[in-house]
Image (cartoon, rainbow, N blue to C red):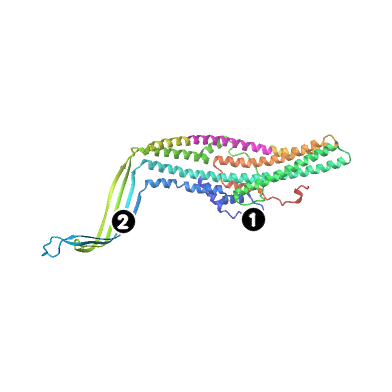
């Protein structure tokens, strides 16, 4: 599954053939921009690459360590002192005569050393290597989760824009309808058919609709800004979710099956499990620090000295040519006897860290179960809500028409009409929100189960429709 996630990640980063060049942008295009520009994913990718080296770093302590050194020394040494020397003439009766003793040396020395060390018995290094393997797998699980999280974040930001956009469209339509109602009310008042109270009620409702529309405009701008944070680009128009988008029950329908699958595949739970394993290996390594360590050692040395030397003491002069090479093999056994208590303290610290990660794993497992159950229930509920919200639009429309007819004949007042209008537009907003809630909750459910891939983005994009060109009739006047 992890390889599948990586495969789709690379595909999304390189798939530029699907870029939509029109003014409106699809969900697939937004996702591709996010893969290229999202700083959170970039940081997660760097963290993955860095932490995946833990295995290689820990393995190095188990492999041979080879060190080489080279030194070059030039020695130019002159010395002289006044003393006594033996006379060179054998007939000279003096045993010693005064003289000047001189020594001159000019040599070049090169030395090459190669040392090889190999751990023969080192349990802390072995357990650290096993910890490094767990940490590398942990890094992969965390990065896979971040990739899935990007899918959810992009979808949430995208559909939050659509949510805000439809709320604005509904607010504009509501303001326009109430404005027309206000104009009709003023005309009826002018001919004496209604009281001034109805005009005040209509005007108050219109003012409230204007405020609602302004708030919706602000929310749409905020939603676009949140989308830009992920993609690194500015957006002003995106494709809409088609009315034909199917809202179906999750498959499989049984909640227990989703929970079972999540316990096996949820990446946050995998990360918690691997973190516990890594901490366990670290605790073993710290306990083993009390044991002896056996290290094998091999050293090869090669030394060469060239030059010349002369001395009046011995009345000789000659060349210096000294060459030496050799090797040595040995074993060294070390065992800590007392380190100021640091080894025991490290052992106790590692043991408590293991307990901490174990409890975190238990908590993560329980949260995974709870979140999966809750999201499954939310999706099932959303399916029913979408159907009910869609039906409520039809019912609200019929209720508004009946109320308006009653107002025309005098059996209903203007407050009833305004309330019926508000209920209709609220039903439209609730229907849109229910559809978007279903999409997001379904993605979150698949994320909990560990099955979420970028293909979900491309599948959703097939159900998007290019928005119509804006017209003057969609904007309220005055």
* Residue in view at x 37 percent, y 48 percent: 63
Residue at 65 percent across and 38 percent down: it is 383
Q: Is 376 on the left-hand or right-hand side of 346?
A: right
Q: In this rendering, does residue 241 appear at all?
A: no
Examine the rendering and report whether any part of residue 112 can be seen.
yes
Instruction: Name the one closer to the observer, 245 or 359.
Output: 359
Q: Position of residue 86 (x, y in %)?
A: 15, 61
Which quarter of the figure has residue 148? Answer: top right
Q: Which x, y percent locates residue 194?
A: 86, 37
Element at label 2: strand
Asked whether residue 336 is drawn in magenta, I would say no
Name the one closer to the observer, 353 or 457: 353
Give the labeled residue for mark 1. Answer: 21
Q: What secondary structure prevails in the magenta region?
A: helix
Of badges 1 and 2, the one in the foreground is: 2
Read off the magenta span: 358-387
User: Mark number for residue 112?
Assistant: 2
- Mark 1 surroundings within 10 Å by alpha-carbon count, few (fewer than 14), some (14 through 19), many (20 or more): few
Q: Residue at x 74, y 42 (%)?
A: 211
């Amino acid at each position: 599954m992890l390889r599948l996630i990586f495969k789709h990640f690379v595909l999304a980063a390189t798939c530029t053939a699907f870029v939509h060049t029109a003014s409106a942008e699809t969900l697939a295009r937004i996702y591709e921009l996010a893969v290229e520009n999202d700083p959170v994913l970039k940081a997660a990718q760097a963290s993955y690459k860095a932490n995946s080296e833990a295995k290689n770093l820990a393995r190095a302590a188990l492999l041979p360590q080879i060190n080489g050194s080279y030194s070059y020394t030039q020695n130019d040494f002159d010395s002289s002192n006044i003393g006594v020397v033996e006379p060179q003439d054998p007939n000279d009766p003096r045993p010693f005569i005064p003289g000047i003793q001189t020594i001159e040396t000019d040599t070049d020395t090169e030395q090459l050393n190669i040392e090889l060390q190999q751990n023969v018995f080192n349990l802390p290094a072995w357990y650290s290597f096993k910890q490094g393997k767990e940490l590398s797998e942990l890094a992969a699980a965390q990065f896979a989760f971040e990739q899935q999280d990007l899918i959810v974040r992009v979808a949430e930001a995208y559909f939050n824009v659509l949510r805000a956009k439809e709320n604005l469209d509904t607010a504009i339509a509501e303001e326009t309808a109430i404005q027309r109602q206000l104009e009709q009310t003023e005309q009826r008042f002018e001919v004496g058919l209604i009281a001034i109270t109805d005009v005040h009620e209509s005007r108050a409702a219109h003012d409230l609709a204007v405020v609602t529309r302004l708030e919706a405009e602000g929310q749409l701008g905020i939603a676009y800004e949140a989308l830009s944070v992920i993609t690194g680009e500015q957006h002003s128009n995106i494709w809409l979710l088609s009315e034909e988008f199917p809202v179906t029950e999750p498959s499989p329908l049984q909640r227990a099956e989703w929970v079972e699958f999540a316990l096996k595949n949820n990446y946050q739970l995998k990360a918690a499990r691997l973190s516990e394993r890594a901490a366990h290996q670290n605790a073993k390594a710290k306990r083993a620090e009390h044991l002896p360590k056996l290290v094998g050692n091999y050293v090869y040395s090669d030394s060469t000295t060239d030059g010349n030397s002369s001395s009046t003491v011995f009345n000789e002069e000659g060349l210096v040519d000294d060459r030496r090479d050799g090797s040595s093999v040995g074993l060294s056994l070390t065992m800590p006897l007392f380190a100021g208590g640091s080894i025991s303290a490290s052992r106790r610290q590692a043991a408590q860290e293991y307990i901490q990660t174990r409890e975190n794993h238990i908590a993560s497992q329980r949260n995974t179960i709870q979140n999966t159950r809750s999201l499954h229930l939310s999706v099932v509920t959303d399916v029913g809500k979408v159907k009910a919200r869609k039906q409520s639009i039809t019912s609200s429309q019929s209720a508004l028409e009946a109320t308006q007819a009653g107002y025309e004949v005098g059996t209903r007042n203007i407050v009833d009409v305004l309330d019926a209008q508000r209920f209709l537009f609220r039903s439209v907003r609730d229907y849109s929100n229910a559809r978007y809630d279903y999409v997001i909750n379904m993605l979150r459910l698949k994320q909990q189960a560990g099955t979420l891939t970028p293909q979900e983005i491309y599948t959703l994009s097939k159900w998007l429709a290019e928005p119509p060109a804006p017209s003057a009739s969609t904007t309220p006047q005055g």
